[in-house]
Amino acid sequence: MQKQAEVVTLGYALKLSGAEMLELDHRELGVVVTRVGIAKRWGLQIFDTSAGGAGHALELFENGKQWLATTVQVLYRSEAHDARCETACIRCLLTTGSQLDYEKGNLQRRSVLRTLRNLLKAAETSL
């Protein structure tokens, strides 16, 4: 997963699932997607938006497996949703914060859902 749109999608999905998991308003978590490192590959940063931090991001990273499972659920929602939502909608990824990326074509729900499922499946079989 290295395309900008996929990393942007993953960022929003992690942010929204993290907020759902911790029962927070999604605006309490921030996400930035940018090129990082010498290779200038796409990367993302999830952070607390409150001044000085609130520990939410730390709690999410400490519960990474649950966070990823919740992210899959946010992207999937239901069989009916999965059948009709191609890139993003109000049920999964679309918020006032993600609207501009949606309009730019930077939300790719199905692709990221497939990638996350494959990663989680591979992690389970390697244990």
Image (cartoon, rainbow, N blue to C red):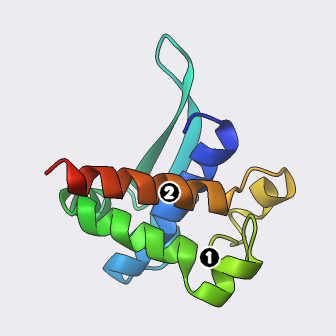
- The disc placed on residue 35 is none
Task: Identify which amino acid the numbered label 1 is placed on.
Answer: Cys
Residue 71 visible in the current orientation: yes
Point 86% across, 58% down: residue = 103
Q: Is residue 75 above or below residue 49?
A: below
Task: Identify which amino acid the numbered label 2 is placed on.
Answer: Gly
Mark 2 Cα shell of 10 Å, populated few (<14), some (14-19), many (≥20): some
Residue 108 is situated, as x and y percent measured from the top left of the image, at: 69, 56
Residue 52 visible in the current orientation: no
Q: Which residue is mark 1?
A: 92
- The disc placed on residue 30 is 2
Q: Is residue 85 above or below residue 15?
A: below
Q: Nearer the viewer, mark 1 or mark 2?
A: 1
Residue 12 occupies which quadrant of the picture?
bottom right
Q: Is residue 115 above or below residue 83?
A: above
The one of 78 and 37 positioned closer to us in this rendering: 78
Point 48% across, 10% down: residue = 38
Secondary element type, mark 1 = loop
Residue 86 occupies which quadrant of the picture?
bottom right
Identify the image quadrant of the N terminus. Answer: top right
Residue 79 is situated, as x and y percent measured from the top left of the image, at: 60, 86
**Farthest front residue in view:** 125
Side of 76 where 100 appears, left or right: right
Secondary element type, mark 2 = strand
**Farthest right residue in view:** 103
